[in-house]
Amino acid sequence: MMLRTCRVLCSQAGPSAGGWQPLSFDGGAFHLKGTGELTRALLVLRLCAWPPLVTHGLALQAWSQRLLGSRLSGALLRASIYGQFVAGETAEEVKGCVQQLQTLGLQPLLAVPTEEEPDSAVKTGEAWYEGNFSAMLRCVDLSRGLLETPGPTGNILMQLKVTALTSARLCKELTSWIRKPGASLELSPERLAEAMDSGRDLQVSCLNAEQNQHLRASLSRLHRVVKHARAQHVRLLVDAEYTFLNPALSLLVDALAMRWNSPGEGGPWVWNTYQAYLKDTHERLRRAAEAADRAGLAFGVKLVRGAYLDKEREVAQHHGTEDPTQPDYEATSQSYSRCLELMLTQVSHRGPMCHLMVASHNEESVRQATKRMWELGIPLDGPVCFGQLLGMCDHVSLALGQAGYAVYKSIPYGSLEEVIPYLIRRAQENRSVLQGARREQKLLSQELRRRVLGRGLRVPH
């Protein structure tokens, strides 16, 4: 059965006499999943496409706990939303989830579900960031321990959220300074990288004493996380966030890259995320790729469409500034396509010195990537991989995985109390993705109907 599926789904990496054979995302690989899994997926995706549930998710959760009690409410969540999108709470549960993914040809991309609103004053103090630092180290160890045999590319990947280790307020302050004409060289990646590596005290004139102390502590946390990840052979994919934070985040990532993405380290160990829904992304990505090439550094990129559309537009309107986002979905798709072409060309020229994750739920973007990989001679086990969220877009993930591509599922894990606010926030940020999952719902319905009526592929239970 597995061999027959591969023959149907597989496209080949490189020119062949048969020509280009595109992947089919018609849900044919759903036969690899059990009926219970498909049923839950259909019900949960339909629920998540209902706007009131997403908008008022936290309030509905609190109401459910009061009405049903914590135990029953928790059981319902575990059987539905938590079970669909979360690997589990314990290391054993996470390992079970990952083993199941591996049997389907998929790999894990673990994410610590840390939540902090950029303007929140609730979570402050070094103790909170040190706690997150310890959680990140545990995630590195878990990522390494889960995979006795790494995936097709040999890479173990993990997500890293910088604002879990450094204050969003500090990042806003740094961003404001970076954006000023003739910004001081005090904030150069070279100076920050030197401070990270040497452990010397760093003083930045635009920050007060408390902020400078927090910056030094933050640099130390980031450096130690990457050092530990490098020792464990885990590559870190840094999440992009809001535009009023991203310049500071990119500065920190550039500093880490200068230290850890050198050829001698076998990098890239630190990747940055680029959001195609921002107007300036292609130009920033081009400059970053060229700078890495000139410096002889390995370059790692996770390419996404972006998730903060509504918030970005609200902030721009509130401050009377230009909207930084693309005008519509079509323009965002064109931006994604241009960025994808840029990065695949970089990969074809620089080989293992340039890594790319095509993080997309869009079938056309995935088709473009696989076709260009074939045209450029980029092998399936090379430095290009694909990424989707756990519990979503399985018709694309499974087809890619069964065809031999490296596919990662972004996997949050932790307790209900930790993960549910995280999931609701991600749902609010990804409304368009959730509401656009109608095709996946249709394919799930078709597969379930075939099973109920006894037609088509049979699934062993």
Image (cartoon, rainbow, N blue to C red):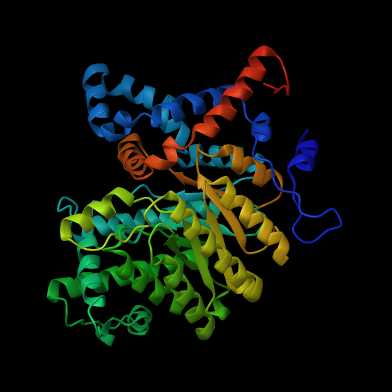
Q: Residue at x 17, y 61 (%)?
A: 320
Q: In the image shown, does 201 or 377 lie closer to the viewer?
A: 377
Q: Is residue 199 left or right of residue 454?
A: left
* Image quarter of residue 182: bottom left
Say how many tags the image has.
0
Vertical order, 97 against 373 (above or below) = above
Q: Quadrant of residue 37?
A: top right
Residue placed furthest toward the right: 17
- The spot of residue 202 in percent (x, y) is 25, 82
- Say whether residue 434 is left or right of residue 21: left
User: Is 298 left, or right, of 209 in this rendering?
Assistant: right
Instruction: Answer left or right for 390 relative to 379.
Output: left
- Can residue 196 be spotted in the picture? yes
x, y percent for residue 420:
33, 36
Tell which of 429 and 91 is nearer to you: 429
Q: Position of residue 110 (x, y in %)?
A: 47, 50
Does residue 302 sit above or below 208 in this rendering? Answer: above
The location of residue 135, given as percent across then percent down, is 36, 53
Q: Quadrant of the N terminus?
A: top right
Which residue appears at 47% of the width and 81% of the height?
Answer: 291
On screen, residue 190 above or below 313: below
Q: Which of 165/312 is in front?
A: 312
Residue 115 in view, yes or no: no
Q: Image point 30% across, 58% down: which residue?
A: 242
Task: Give the position of the C terminus as an image quadrant.
Answer: top right
